[in-house]
Image (spheres, rainbow, N blue to C red):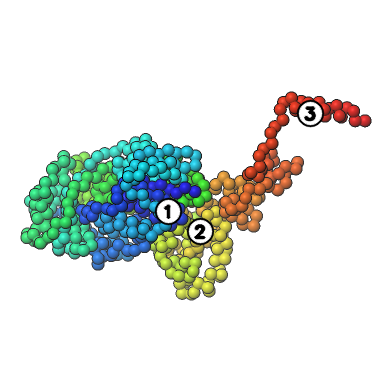
Amino acid sequence: MDPVIIAGAGPVGLALALALARHTVPTVVLDEGPGKDEQRLARTTVLREDTAAFVERLVGQSFGDVESGARWASWRSLRRKQVMRELAFDDEVPSPLHVPQHVLTGALREAIAGERLVEIATESKLDSLEQDASGVTAHSRGPKDTWWRGSYLVGCDGSRSTVRKLLDVRFPGRTAVERHAVAALRTELPWPGEALLHRMPPWRGGGAEVTGRPLAGGVWRLDWLLPPRGELVTPDALVLRIRETLAGWCGGSTPPYELLDTGVHPAHHRLARRWRVGRAFLAGDAAHLLGALGTQGLDEGLRDAENLAWKLALAWHHGPHDPLLDSYQAERRAGVAARLRAADQSLPVLRGGGGLRSYVPGAARGHDVLLTDGHVGRGPLGAPSSYADSPLAPVPSESQVAVGTESGAPVADVRVTAPDGSFVQLRERLGLGHLLVVLVAPGTVVWERRHWVTAGIMPRLAAAVTALPHPAELLVAESYPGAAAHSVLLVRPDGYLVTALSGVRPAELYAAAEAAVGGARPAARERGKQAGGGGEDGDGEGKGGVNFRKEAREQPERPGPPGPAGRGGGDRGAPRARPRHCHRAASPTLPEARNSRRRSRRTRARTP
């Protein structure tokens, strides 16, 4: 089958290529540039716990910890000279990851260099695409104009996306809802390793708001909120801001500093009308733009990549399944739209004052809560989206139980026992193409796996997992937040909880797994009917616990058992199956048919 074409070699496009490679799907990445990224320390990204773990799984390395400066020790919010809020990061409240974007992209490129399923075509700019029933044909221009043939195409080519324009998808929204002057510098501040937000600083020329966020190597990124009317930021004006800010934070005297990079960062809010058009998809900045109030567009772009990768992989390996592919837009667009809506509702409160201000309790403290949520990844402005209303959500059952994670939300990263008996973190088992079934069994950590793997409910649960309509891995956890003993959690390949059941419930588990992958495919439903009821009564198994989906994929097409009146197949009136390479005989012409009937009548008349 043809590879997936990815237009754009930014962090989202490269992450999607690596994620698809983990699902054994080949990709071609069309890179407009020469294959190297400009080093800009003033262009950084803040990744929350889930997206940081996703990227580190892909590249196979850590980007650093609090000691290295890549993660923050705490968050501090000030207003004038008063400390409004302090938040210390720990295992319960993980610290965000703060890295320059070129460092992130470089790590992804290095991982791709050793990946045989990913091909990067440098200096190749997409300029046309056509779709048909079996794939996509795209053309790129560059030193060598090339036609590409792919099974699917994903546009990760940024805010001015060529793919989006070729698909004729509208991109409404607002331009420059916020503007920041940015400087990256190396210096020492009174709060080593602590990120801070200072509103209405008391020194002259401090402006309305300044943010300081540490990076690895003793580097800081400072952001000053600019007036909405487009104030021109000259080099001299920016240096003055730097000196006054450092002096204000350091007791009146400017400490030594080394200015490394500067820039002006505008934040836009836009959302594409459609994220899927046939076999073409949009992801990252091609699908959405956000960034005001501390929100991170790249954070959402990486969630797009993780969500789309396993769904495209299923379609690539087992054939298109529209309910599953459509769920990408339903889940991700709704999540980003909720984030944009929360930011748009908060902007007048935080930036404009006026009428809505009275609705925020505690005024200044309420403002700090909103801004802290946006910067550290909490609440409507920062927390990962929930897919509770996803079309892939199963129908609630009586066996469903509540745990510390709501259905449709990212699972907690607890320690689990893998099938080989090793202890790993749950997130390490994500992104490998299969569902995860987690049994909460207190006491299993005390005994070796061989002692309990064949005891209690384990054999029944293992049999139920084997019979699921999609490959799944059975894991065992000593505990899970809010879960009772013998709870069974079903987790999607991207780490979102499908459902939690009380005990071993094969029928409910099968139904939930089937819903999580978009419902039964037509081939699986037909095979279930022929096998005798698995596709009809909802228990997911036919006679002998047959995995219908796997059987339909691996077995050749054959006629069913004899039916009524000597017909082949179990359904009355169903057409008989023909071998794939047989040709249908030509039908007799109308005169020939009439002559045949006349000869038959004469023969019967002469018979004594």
Residue bearing mark 3 = 596
CA separation in Å, label 2 and label 3: 60 Å
Q: Secondary structure at mark 1?
A: helix
Instruction: Please provide percent x and percent y for residue 599.
Output: 82, 27
Q: Is residue 369 visible?
A: no
Q: Quadrant of residue 70?
A: bottom left
CA separation in Å, label 1 and label 3: 61 Å
Q: Amino acid at mark 3?
A: Ser
Instruction: Please provide percent x and percent y for residue 299.
Output: 32, 52
Residue bearing mark 2 = 472
Q: Is residue 210 above or below residue 167?
A: below
Q: Secondary structure at mark 2?
A: strand
Q: Which residue shows up at 36% across the image and 49% down it?
A: 121
Q: Which residue shows up at 45% across the image and 58% down it?
A: 432
Q: Earlier in the sequence, mark 2 or mark 3?
A: 2
Q: Quadrant of residue 113?
A: bottom left
Return the residue nearer the eye: 37 or 339.
Answer: 37
Residue bearing mark 1 = 20
Q: Earlier in the sequence, mark 1 or mark 3?
A: 1
Apparent side of residue 418 relative to residue 290 in the rendered image (left or right): right
Q: Is residue 70 visible?
A: yes
Q: Quadrant of residue 154?
A: top left
Q: Are there few (<14), some (14-19), or many (20+) residues within 10 Å of tag 2?
A: many
